[in-house]
Amino acid sequence: MNVPQDELERAVREAFSRQAAMSRAPAHDPAHAAIRHANRIQRRRALAGMSLAAVVIVVVSAGAMHLGDDQPPTGSTVVIGEPDPVPDGSRTAVPPPTGPDTEAALAEVDLVLGETIATAQGRRVNVSGAGGVERAHRLADGRGWLAVGAPTLSGRMLWAVTPTGTAQVLLAGADEIVLDRQGQQVAWKQGTVLASSRIVNGELTGTVRAEAPTEAVPLRYVDNAVLVRLAPDRPGHVLWRVRPGPLDTGTDRASTHVFGPLLDGRLVGEVTTGTSQRPCLTLLDPAQGLVPAQPDCGPELRGDGLGAVSPDGRWLLANGRSGGQESALLVDLTQLGPSAEVRPAGPQMTGSVAWFTSDRAYYADITGGLVRVDVDRVRASRPAAPVALPGLLAGQRPVVVTGG
């Protein structure tokens, strides 16, 4: 091309000037194409990050909504209600025993021996995934057990144990846990939160919470209400009717111990009477705020409150003092007055009492032995029969399983 050098240079300068003045770079500009490509990549990454964050928020929100009914407003109690398989850490799978799992039955009731449940049918079920069991309840129809752990620095735990030995945590971090007689309801206390839930298909549902004094402790279910001791160092109980809101502490400031109900709904308990504040055994009316339901006051047990009423309401087996010695006492409740029949039944008990029938019961004594109480034998002034527990390790105490 026959173009002078100065005209060529001027044409190039004008082209660069026009290109610099344009708001958008031409499509064939390599530099701008690279910048556009980089911007598209950055936008795609930002959108992907926002989408992932949105998914996480939705999942967490859904989980919070699912568990919202089961989380206490204060404290550190954890309620777990998951009937389906859950990740490791929420459920502990305990393998069934490896060897023969049937041996000679040790008693007519189930026993927890360390990390094993010895059933009344002679089966041995390994429950090593639910360590430190303090109380246990057998569910009806062979559906397994509910086990309450001993208190630890992190609180008590509640496990559901299947007949094959799979232990699932239902509750953790509670100060106290109590079950109803059918194993269908659980009440617990943590801090100032008093709560009750139904147990349905291995999960807790329908949780109701109340605000209670810090020192208040749930003791047992009475029908669908929860008996609460207002303080461990002074008399007074109240029935919580499982309603939300502040706990109505009632007017009872006389009852010291409550052992259980009769068939007509009245409760067997001890109250302090007169200026001497001597505790004596009597019947309490739950419909009238736990006031004594009869004018007469029965015998003085002077025990620690451990004990249980027989299924037919005829007998009370509880700790007390007789002849200057502490022991388990058998009390006839048919004529509960000053002349009521009271007989020593065996060594002092610890833990729960399991009535196998209306005239036979089992409990663990303070030395770690198992005691069988036969009413006719005790009334004949013969001592309760100890039950041999072969293979029980030194320092290991049996836990008598209730219910079933």
Image (cartoon, helix red, strand yellow):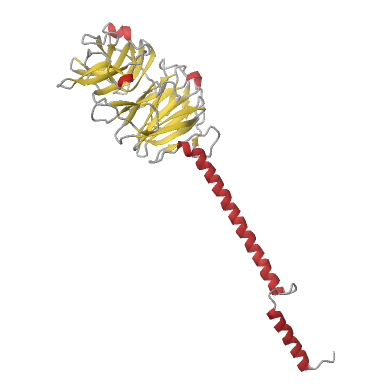
Question: For this rendering, which residue is in front, 66 or 120?
Answer: 66
- Residue found 53% across the figure and 32% down from its top: 83
Q: Quadrant of residue 316?
A: top left
| Residue at the far left in the pictured view | 275
Left or right of 84: which side holds 265? left
Left or right of 210: which side holds 126? right
Q: How many marks?
A: 0
Question: For this rendering, which residue is in front, 269 or 80?
Answer: 269
- Residue found 26% across the figure and 11% down from its top: 336
Q: Position of residue 372 (x, y in %)?
A: 34, 14
Q: Quadrant of residue 292?
A: top left
In this rendering, the answer to whether 30 lies above or below 203 is below
Q: Is residue 82 visible?
A: yes
Question: For this rendering, which residue is in front, 34 or 352?
Answer: 34
Q: Position of residue 74 (x, y in %)?
A: 38, 41
**Which quarter of the figure is the C terminus placed in?**
top left
Q: Position of residue 17 (x, y in %)?
A: 70, 84
| Residue at the far right in the pictured view | 1
Q: Is residue 130 visible?
A: no
